[in-house]
Amino acid sequence: MPPPPRRHIAGDSILAPTTSHAGMVKLLADLLHHTPPSTWPPALAAPALRSRLAPAHVSSLLLLPASLSRPDLSRRFLLLLPPHLVSPLCLSLLALSFVSASPSSPPPSPHAASLLLSLASSSPSASSSFSSLSHACSLSPFPPATTATAATLLASSYLRLRRVRDAADVLHLSLSAGITPNQYTVSQILFSLVKIRQFTLARAVFDEMLQSGVRLDEYVYTAGIRAYCEARNIDGAKGLVARMQDEGVKVGVVPYNVLMYGLCKNQRVQEAVEVKNNMVVRGVAADEVTYRTLVYGFCRAEELEMALRVTYDMARLGFVPSEANCSFMLDGLRKRGKIEEAFRLACRLGEFGMVPNIFAYNALIDSLCKNGMFGEADKLFNEMVDKGLEPNEVTYSILIHSFCKRGMMEDALDMFDRMREKGVRVTVYPYNSLISGCCKQDDLDRAMSFLSEMADMGVTPNATSYSPLIAGFCRKGDLSNAVELHREMAEKGVAWNTYTFTALINGFCKDKKMDEASWLFDKMIDRNLLPNEATFNVMIEGYCLVGNIRKAFQLYDQMVDRGLTPDNYTYRSLISGICLTSGVSKANEFVADLEKNCSVLNKFSLAALMHGFCREGRWTEAYGVWNEMATRGVKLDLVSFTIIVYAALEQHDAEKSSVLLREMKEKSVRPDNVFHTCMINIHSKAGNMVEALNCWDKMIADGCFPNTFTYTVLVNNLCKSGHLSSAELLCKEMLASHFLPNNYTYNCFLDYFTTEGDLETAKDLYLAMLRGSLANIVTVNTLIKGFCKVGQIQEAIDLIRKSTENGFFPDCISYSTVIHELCKKGDTNKAFELWNEMLYKGLKPDIVAYNILIRWCNVHGEIDKGLGIYNDMIKKGVQPNWHTYRALLLGTSVMTSKQDAILLIT
């Protein structure tokens, strides 16, 4: 008797070698709809099925009526498939199935939202994801409401991903296809665009909604009014309110409040009052926000009496004025010398339960301190007891903070002692002020003693206690102590926050250690701490400092996508970075683009552009920026004057520099140590020591005394001009003035000896610097340069390898100097050995290092090696410059094929 036919079970190989598309889909359908889910994993893991399965089979499976009616089952099936089989079309079809299966539920299926979020995050663009969704809609007769809901969810997904402009693209594509997304989502897109200051795009989106013929609701109109107001098209915003009223849209108080705020912000408070009156006539009751907005408008217009009147009206209606408006009115009365009236106002507010009486004094004292009226604040403090009010911990904290902010640490400590003598509870706030004050004076030992005292007194430090200390150590270049404090926070249970991370990231960025800074940035995000504008700014500045402008702009885009607003600190870094890497012409184009997009550039950004022109010797354009700053009413500060006066002196334009110095005096811009040091530097660098010493005397006459940096600048220029004995004499005077020469000062002498070829003296000085802990990597590089100059290349290589024993880690300059000398002597093999050693140690070559190797490879006819280095440079994100292209073109002169040369140039 023959054996019975063998039954196939899940997971068996049952596929013919040439299974058709329809056969594959039928097989999947049988598996999905006619077998229990427990059998799916082994069946899908079968090699014969897995090797033939394609995304098209899965999408065809999802289009079957049985699959469309059971999206939950289809979803379970898809979760077992490898990611490459789940195409954007599959995600779209399944999402549409979920929406179609529950058309009446007000919040759409969470599974549909999750699927479309996956589609948005995996698609390269909004148009790509929308195209997948549209294609899915065309493959099955989904109801129009299903399509509209899915489009709405896709736009919402981009909002969740903080890709607001992509959400706006989905809205535009939907409207173009005749699909009307949910109006609440439309309003969220508009508000999000306004939040990231994309006012023009927000207006365009709103106008497109108007033109679509869809009847807009209150939410969309409110968002449109906000967009028009932020774009300063106030009359257009008023027109929208009128149109909304004409169309009979049922609205509450919110759109009126938004328009009123726009009017008040633009100094049109009387029109805001008219809007409020018109609103009340139409039966819409004013709320607390309405009154707060009017008070804000009157305060902004400095109509203090009207602001007070509206505030008292608010109080009678039981509404509470905002703390900002109360502070503004109190401050307004104080500015007019009506301190008692301000106190009476605060007391009256207290009667209504808005502020306690002690708050009135504290607010006034704080206001006086912030405005520099310290005598009045002290008087008010002394009057408190007479009024029957005992200063509390807030009062003392305000005064201690004020003293610390002004650098009056002894007065702050006296007030701190008085606080403890009176038995007032000491909180973390005065300690934080004392720590911050000490850190600002670089007295980190004393600041650390306060941190220790807090623990002894049972006061728990917080992140604000650590932030200034971390920043202080970073400022001194002591990153190890900064990292140790950061670690201590975690050990003591003090939560890291955005500010502590930012302080530490800033330290690494200033030290040009971008790998460490980037690691901290990523770690911060992993811990769900959102980077703020300051975090992005220090990262952008760091990448600009190391010349990686591409990464800087990637962070800039990421910053905008997260809804953060770039400011002039951002722009200044980018302008300086572009000047450094691509030249000031490109930076000028960037500035023009910013201004075209309504960005208001201030003295920081414009001074960076002016400095860029000065560095390239383009004096006419630099003066043009200077004149434009004056025309715009930009306050010309000491930094701006320092740049332009320095430029005039570099150009040997004595007349222009005299005019500028006179203008400084007229504008009451007082020179500081930095300004005077720059003047000493420019004159001594030009060899005009008489004028440099005159500037030295002028510095002292202005009450600015030379510091270590001033001495070092003059020592450096004396050494460079060959006046070694004068430099040594100045160094002795420096010691007599109780200023200790630092490593920069001694490096000036070391540079002189290496330049003169006096290597024995240079080595003696280097050893002395090592003994005095004054050597650094710059010291090592200076000596390496000296060895290379006299042909002692092996000594230079030995110094690189021994420097780690002294705690110095060779950098890109160390290796590039020796590589250049080896190539110059024709030993490219040894040069490449050093290059590979540098890469092995994790050092990233800069543009100078790449250019050196590319040039010498071409000089020695090793064209392929040169091109290989060039390709590696591009891959690593290092921007080529003119020197790179010149080195490459040098190689074309020795290339045997003209065709190759043409290909290289193109």
Image: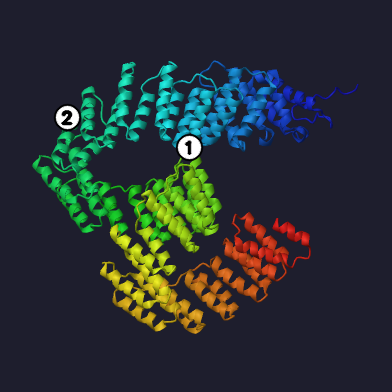
Could you tell whether 703 is left or right of 101 in the image? left
Could you tell whether 218 is left or right of 552 in the image? left
Query: Extreme front residue here?
Result: 655
Q: Is residue 206 above or below residue 570?
A: above
Q: Which mark is residue 198?
A: 1
Q: Nearer the viewer, residue 10 or 887?
A: 887
Q: Quadrant of the C terminus?
A: bottom right
Q: Is residue 38 above or below residue 842?
A: above
Identify the amino acid type marked 1. Answer: Gln
Could you tell whether 95 is left or right of 6 in the image? left
- Nearest to N terminus: mark 1 or mark 2: 1
Q: Nearer the viewer, residue 10 or 805?
A: 805
Residue of label 2: 351
Considering the numbered disc 1 on the image, is that residue within a helix, a strand or a loop? loop
Q: Position of residue 92 (x, y in %)?
A: 63, 27
* Residue 510 visible in the snapshot: no
Identify the amino acid type marked 2. Answer: Glu
Q: Residues within 10 Å of mark 2 (few under 14, many from 20)?
A: few
Q: Residues within 10 Å of mark 1 (few under 14, many from 20)?
A: many
Name which residue lies at 79% across and 27% down: 21
Q: Nearer the viewer, residue 155 or 697?
A: 697
Query: Extreme left residue here?
Result: 386
Q: Position of residue 718 (x, y in %)?
A: 41, 78
Considering the numbered disc 2 on the image, is that residue within a helix, a strand or a loop? helix
